[in-house]
Amino acid sequence: MRLGCVRAPRTVNPTPPRAKWPGAGPAGAAEIPPAVPRPRTVLVLGGGGMKGFAHIGAIRAIERLGLHVDEVVGTSMGAVMGAIYAAGLDSVRMEEAAAEISVREFFKLNLLKFLVRGYRHASVYKGKTYHDFLRRLLPRAACQELVKPFFCNALSLETGTMRYFGLPGSSQVPAADAVYASSCLPTIFEPLEIEGEHYIDGGMAETLCLKLAHARKAELVIAVDLSLRDHHRRVPYKASLPHIVFQTYEIMGNAVHEHSLHRYAGNNVVLLKPKVSHFGLLDAPPLEEVVRLGEREALEGLTTHPLTRYLCDPAAVREVERSIPAPRDYVRLDVDMNACIHCGVCAVTCATEGYAAVPWGDVVRKVHNYECTHDGACERNCPTHAIRLHNL
């Protein structure tokens, strides 16, 4: 038997907040008058391996809806897609470039070096083929020389600090080198030496670089987060090194990522989470399908979110509305009280007080949690899998 959730009185306004810049009228209103300046918008693309093709779909939705992007920030595969977009390619040409990314070609074993040097070698796969591909795609261009300002992050192995390529002091680094550093999974590709330091994937510490977007004084942040995962679905165990390494990366990344969302997913962030969790980091998913999933999520999110719905081309919104069942302004919290053991983990984990402590246990406080940071932390940390989140 399933019991209903016990709820304290709601303490939030059920009406989603309006956009803060002038001209934002009721849903369905005319486009913002030309005299009203549009918000300074930063597009943030997160890491996720081959799931990163979903970024192409998100960019296609931005193009369809007539939204303007001022700067691009990317991490790992988000850096790859972000750099291509910042270089001036539209979503059609980006998809053509993505079709050239071959798992079989890029992930070739360093077999000869392993036989000679064993575990003293730096990586399982050869990074040269991948690096050469990036150089062909972004020939000789520094980050500051792209059509749109572009930034990406990577971790220094020597100091353990994060470096943001594209900022002053790092703006002259070739974009291909910066993107390789940002997407260099440790033990998978050889770390790249840049100015005396060796760099690895920035997603090891910050897979969605919201911190830099805020530092760039963004008025609006459109963030595409590929970390959404169904915590109620078991991933079959495989006794292989790549499976164990990639699963470890993903689990660690989710744990680190939730803290970043708690702090930086503020009220000027539109967070898009394409439903691509069923693809692995280095799977070879159907390109068209992943792009479609990214586009659908972005169309639904951008046309219903209060910060962006008024900025979209009204004609495009009317076309999209035919296939969108309902607004996506809130996350619904659901707790199976038969499975709940009242441990209190959810109450101390949720950053937006979705759960409340009562004498006999912690229960759902809000059914419609408008302030949710969309990090899935309560669901991931629930020891009995009693929590389910809907409408993410």
Image (cartoon, rainbow, N blue to C red):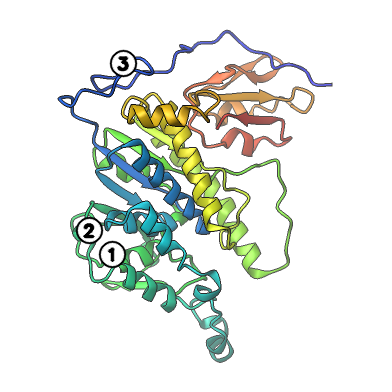
Q: Which mark is residue 219?
A: none
The mark nearer the N terminus, 2 or 3, is 3
Q: Which residue is mark 1?
A: 175
Q: Residue at x 33, y 44 (%)?
A: 43
The residue pinned by badge 3 equals 25
Residue located 23% across and 20% down the image: 22
Looking at the picture, which amino acid does disc 1 mark? Answer: Ala
The image quadrant where one finds the N terminus is top right
Calculate the distance from the C-alpha at mark 2 to the C-alpha at mark 3: 35 Å
**Which residue in the structure is indicated by mark 2?**
146
Judged from the image, the secondary structure of the residue bearing numbered disc 3 is: loop
Q: Identify which residue is drawn at 72% across, 63% down.
A: 238
- Amino acid type at circle 2 is Leu
CB atoms at circles 1 and 2 under 8 Å apart? yes
Of the two numbered discs 1 and 2 on the same chain, state the one appearing first in sequence.
Answer: 2
User: Which comes before the other along the chain, label 1 or label 3?
Assistant: 3
- Look at the numbered disc 2 and give the secondary structure of its residue: loop
Residue 51 lies, with reference to residue 1, above or below; the image says below
Q: Is residue 34 above or below residue 206?
A: above
Residue 318 lies, in percent from the top left, at 42, 26
Mark whose residue sits in front, 2 or 3: 3
Query: Could you classify mark 2 by the number of other residues whose Cα lies within 10 Å: few (under 14), some (14-19), or many (20 or more)?
Result: some
Q: Is residue 115 left or right of residue 214?
A: right
